[in-house]
Image (tube, rainbow, N blue to C red):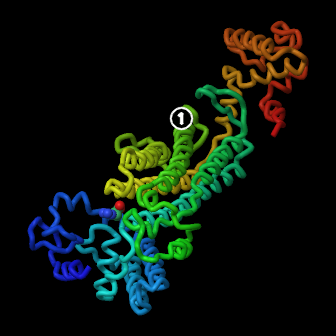
Amino acid sequence: MAARKAGRRRRRTPEPAPPSPSARGQVRGRLVGGLHPAIDRVNRSFEVDRRLWAEDVRGSMAHARMLGARGVLGRRAVARILRGLARVAEEFRTGRFVARPGDEDVHMAVERRLIELIGADGGRLHAGRSRNDQVATDLRLYLVGAAARAQAGVRRVQRALVALAARDGMLALPFYTHLQRAQPVLLGHWLLAYVEMLEGDRRALAYEARECPLGAGAGAGSGFPLDRRQTARELGFARPSPNSLEAVASRADLARVLAGMGDTATTLSRLGADLVLWTSREFGFARLGDAVSTGSSIMPQKRNPDGAELLRALAVRVHAAWLRVQELQRGLPLGYSKDLQEDKPALFDAEDALAGMLDAAEAMLGDLTFDGARMQAALKDPAGFLLATEAADHLVRKGVPFRAAHEAVGRLVRRCEATGRGLGDLNLAELRAAHPAFGPEVRRALTVEGALAARRAV
Ligand code: ARG
């Protein structure tokens, strides 16, 4: 530690250390000289993991307090460390933290700055821990916030959908199977389907940091009389992680949160796909406001749904993050390997992509209008035969087995198609020619209102 501190203090070069014995400034232990710049470039993670500064400081404070309570650190050293860490946090918070070339990652940057601020006592903090349990702890603490932020974003999108349903939910339109018009539904039904899917996603995003890795050390635990229950409690975990090897090696918690983010991304991508279809001239069911539409650099008439398309595309990033984290762990020997450092770019990329998607979805839903006339036209198009199922159900109510009813109505549809008419254009005699069980109440059954009103089950 003393050598490390001296090395850091002597260091003045702003560039990564060249591979010469005079280069100093990193924890080099038995190693002589600086790290080769090519290795330093891939090894360094500070610019990415500096995002964990608040969690890193929190974890360090808990660790210092616990070391104090256990008598590993003196009271004055603990007080100094806590004050120093608070100042480091303040520097990060206010954007005044100055990185040094030797700052390999956020953990070393915080500790380096702490030692600069409070002197040798700062070098006492790392007793009984390793960056391996430190980063695993930071990550789980960060996941709590990331999952909660994503959940809050999902809530906002749900609210926007509910607001649309309250405004226009009683409009009727066709729903689709195989992208072929199928049956009439209410717009509210469609909008609330997304609310429901998002509710499942929100549940999948629920993350509670249960087991605290801190104290697992490099992986074999610590010879100091650590009170792991105290640090776990202080950091909001339910308990210390029971196995120190698992604690430093596993990124299962991360994968679980990424899976929840992936579920959300899938739902938003489908919403995006529907918006792209609906705002097309071919559908014409919806129109995005100018502020959430994009133009074309060549075609002056264009009103493009780029935001909706990107809901589809950004989902790929979120899904890829889950796969990245699984692939990082696949085949790794038990314990910590530096491969795991690549977990954070995956997480942050997914988090940012999803945050962008949630904001964009909320903005588009807030500036979306529906064209009830176009929906009606699609419903009433005689060639759509949207009420064919109602005709068959009518026969079933008259005692006809469903299979026979299905066949009879199929025959009617074929006949209508040949003569360019809709089912509603047929008179009772024509209907009875296809099946004698047709009764006069079929008139009501063969209306959109009748079809919607007939759906009374939960
Ligand atoms: N930056 C590292 C990571 O993100 C911290 C742990 C480094 N541990 C080590 N033994 N080199 O995984």
Residue 380, picture quadrant: top right
Question: Is 167 above or below relative to 276?
Answer: below
Q: Nearer the viewer, residue 276 or 16?
A: 16
Report the quarter where the N terminus lies.
Answer: bottom left
Residue 22, picture quadrant: bottom left
The extreme bottom residue here reads 76
Q: Is residue 127 left or right of residue 429?
A: left
Residue 448 x, y percent position in the rendering = 77, 31
- The answer to whether one can see residue 330 in this image is yes
Label 1 CB, ligand 1: below 8 Å?
Answer: no
- The answer to whether one can see residue 310 in this image is no
Find ligand 1 in the image and state its quadrant: bottom left
Q: Is residue 3 left or right of residue 135?
A: left
Q: Residues within 10 Å of mark 1 (few under 14, many from 20)?
A: few
Residue 291 x, y percent position in the rendering = 49, 54
Residue 98 x, y percent position in the rendering = 28, 77
Residue in the image at 80% along x and 28% along y: 447
Q: Is residue 416 left or right of residue 295?
A: right
Question: Is 103 above or below relative to 342?
Answer: below
Q: Is residue 365 left or right of residue 428?
A: left
Q: Nearer the viewer, residue 137 or 275?
A: 137
Residue in the image at 52% along x and 57% along y: 359
Residue in the image at 64% along x and 41% along y: 371
Residue in the image at 66% along x and 45% along y: 191
Q: For mark 1, what is the residue? A: 281
Residue 438, picture quadrant: top right
Q: Amino acid at mark 1?
A: Arg
Report the quarter where the C terminus lies.
Answer: top right
Where disc 1 sits, the SS reads loop
The extreme top residue here reads 433
Residue 353 x, y percent position in the rendering = 44, 53
